[in-house]
Amino acid sequence: MNNPANNHSGVSLQVRGLRKSFDGQEVLKGIDFEVKPGEIFVIMGPSGSGKSVLLKHLIGLEPPDAGEILINGESIQSPEIAAKYRMALVFQSGALLNSLTVGENVGLYLTEHRLKPPEEIARIVAEKLEDVGLKGAGDKMPGDLSGGMKKRAAIARALVIEPQLILYDEPTSELDPLSAVVIGEEILELNKRIHVTTLVVSHDRALAFGIADRIAVINDGGILTIGTPDEVKRFNDPLVQKFLNADFKHEPKSSL
C-alpha cells in the first residue's frame, strides 16, 4: 500500500458541516464542499463573507466548533493524520523575511529542519526559483523585488516541500492587472505540471473565472453555489449576480 506522503500527486479535500462562532456571532454556518485531487478550486466572495476564517480552519490555525476537514477521507484534526500530508500556504503578503535573501527565504524550511545538506538545498532553491520565472534571483533581497516577484518567490517557497495541497490567500491582491495575470498563469502552469490540488481564496473575479475548474461563492458564512465557471455565471441568485456584476458606475459630465 502506498504511503500518501510519498505520492506527489494531489489529494482530495473535504469540508463537512464546518461551523465557527466568535463572541456569539456565527461566522461559518455549516460549510460543505469537496475539492477533487489535482483540481483548481476557487472560493470567492465579498469582504467579510467568511473566506479568511475558513482558510484559517483549513491550515489548522482555528479549531471548528462543529464539522470536520478531511484529506483523502482522513480527518486532519488528528495531528498524526495531518502529518501524513504535505500542505503549503502562499500568504497574501508573500511573508518573505526582509533580513534573508530570496534564496534563503525559499529554502528556510529545509534549512531550519536540517532536511537536506546545504548543497542540496541550494540546488532545490535554484530549481524552484526557475520554476516560477525567478532564475538567478536567489541572491537578491526581498526589498529588491516587485510585488509580483515577491508573490512568485512565495510560491517557490511553498513548492520546496513538494506539496500535495497548496492554498493561496488572495494571490493577486495589491498587484497591477498585468502582474495579476502572470500570477494566475503561474498557478495554472504549476497545477498542470505537478498535478497539485489547488485551493485559492480570492475576491478577484477575473482570476477565479480565468483559472478555476470549479468555484464556490461564499457569503455571510455560507456557500451560495458551487459549480464550473459557466455554471456559476448562470446561477440565478440575486446575491451571486450582485457580486459577479458589481462595477463602478460613472457617467462622464457632458461638455458645455
Image (tube, rainbow, N blue to C red):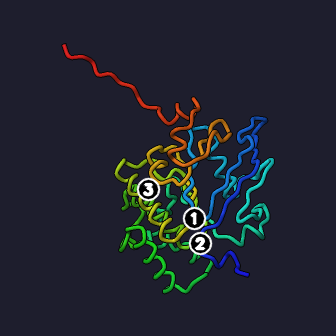
Q: Mark 3 or 1 closer to N-term?
A: 1
Q: Residues within 10 Å of mark 3 (few under 14, many from 20)?
A: some
Separation of residues labelled 3 and 1 (CA atoms)? 16 Å
Viewer-side label of 3, 1: 1
**Amino acid, disc 1:** Gly
Disc 1 on helix, strand or loop? Answer: loop
> Horizontally, is 73 left or right of 47 in the view?
right
Give the labeled residue for mark 2: 9
In the rendered view, tell whether residue 36 sits above or below residue 208: below
Residue name at image x 73 percent, y 60 percent: 70
The percent coordinates of residue 204 (x first, y second) are 48, 45
Residue name at image x 73 percent, y 81 percent: 1
Marks 2 & 1, CB-CB < 8 Å contact: yes
Q: Residues within 10 Å of mark 1 (few under 14, many from 20)?
A: many
Q: Residue furthest left?
A: 256
Viewer-side label of 2, 3: 2
Give the labeled residue for mark 1: 38
Residue name at image x 66 percent, y 52 percent: 56
Separation of residues labelled 2 and 1 (CA atoms)? 7 Å
Disc 2 on helix, strand or loop? Answer: loop
Give the labeled residue for mark 3: 184
Disc 3 on helix, strand or loop? Answer: helix
Residue name at image x 68 percent, y 39 percent: 221
**Amino acid, disc 3:** Gly
The percent coordinates of residue 68 (x first, y second) are 77, 54
Marks 3 & 1, CB-CB < 8 Å contact: no
The percent coordinates of residue 163 (x first, y second) are 59, 70
Separation of residues labelled 2 and 3 (CA atoms)? 21 Å
Q: Residues within 10 Å of mark 2 (few under 14, many from 20)?
A: some
Q: Mark 2 or 3 closer to N-term?
A: 2
The percent coordinates of residue 251 (x first, y second) are 32, 22
**Amino acid, disc 2:** Ser
